[in-house]
Image (cartoon, grey):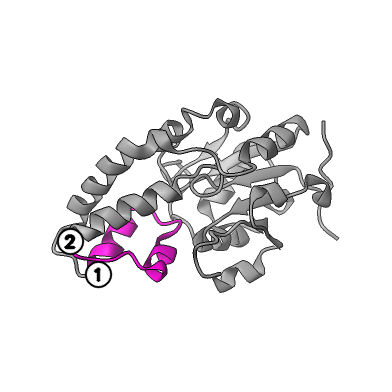
Amino acid sequence: MKPDIRGVIFDLDGLLLDTERILRQVDTETLARYGAILTPDVRQRTLGMTHEAKDRLFVEELRLPVAPEVLGAERAARFAALLPTAGLMPGAARLVTALAASRISLAIATGSTADAARAKLGRHPEIASAIRTIATCDHPRVRRPKPAPDIFLAAADEIGVDPGECLAFEDAPTGVESALAAGMIVIAVPDRDLPLDPIFGRADRVLPSLLAFDPADYGIRPG
């Protein structure tokens, strides 16, 4: 028997916001400048990573002739230029609006910094106004990035809900692992362009998009 759900915690990139498409373009173009290719395997392993960790992985595994800091600066500049084009993922606005109306406590748990998260949500007031609690990598209680549970635990603490009474929505393997480690019920919405990681088998549901989620399946009724 599932517990009563009192909180819902969302990942941000690739789950609510269609930023993974932009990141894929940025990474592909930046790596190509150094003669490297962004393979599906490497891309999947970087999902949910901090930008610094991703830069180190790219340089070390692809043997790029550039320092991780330089690569990161190039990627960051290109991403900032394209960020205004990021839209919402299918079903994101509808689901967040419905959950907000049901008076479920909502939060975001993202590996982005607080400034970056606010910038990403700046063009989407329907999300930003409904979800005011955001746990980020620079939150004072977050010492370890995903797949450690710190970010999800911080988000649950901020909304005052026990982790076991939270649904966590994630698209990345590291995020699924993080939410599971936090003791949450996980809804996975994986990138359909990538192989399905075995960790998704531990999620309570694996959905093709947020459009497929029915809050009533978890006892959540409209407000």
Q: Is residue 185 left or right of residue 53?
A: right
Query: Dividing the picture into quarters, in which one does residue 149 lie?
Result: bottom right
Foreground of the two, 20 or 134: 20
Q: Residues within 10 Å of mark 2 (few under 14, many from 20)?
A: some
Foreground of the two, 99 or 111: 99
| Magenta highlight on residue 50 | yes
Which residue of the protein is positioned furthest toward the bottom in this rendering?
A: 198
Q: Is residue 193 above or below residue 51?
A: below
Cα distance between the residues tagged 1 and 2: 10 Å
Residue 185's x, y, as percent?
Answer: 70, 57
Q: Residue at the location (13% across, 64% down)?
A: 65
Callout 2 amino acid: Tyr
Q: Residue at the location (24% across, 69% down)?
A: 62
Q: Residue at the location (70% across, 43% down)?
A: 7
Q: Residue at the location (16% across, 58% down)?
A: 67
Which residue of the protein is positioned furthest toward the left in this rendering?
A: 65
Foreground of the two, 48 or 3: 48
Q: Which mark is residue 39?
A: none
Query: Dividing the picture into quarters, in which one does residue 131 lie?
Result: top right
Callout 1 amino acid: Leu
Residue 217's x, y, as percent?
Answer: 82, 52
Kindly state the secondary structure of the residue where label 1 is placed.
loop
Residue 97's x, y, as percent?
Answer: 69, 32
Question: What kind of secondary structure does the magenta stretch mostly adopt?
Answer: helix
Q: Earlier in the sequence, mark 1 or mark 2?
A: 2
From which residue to which does the magenta span run?
34-61
Q: Which residue is mark 1?
A: 62
Residue 18's x, y, as percent?
Answer: 49, 44
Q: Which residue is mark 2?
A: 34
Q: Are marks 1 and 2 in contact (CB under 8 Å)?
A: yes
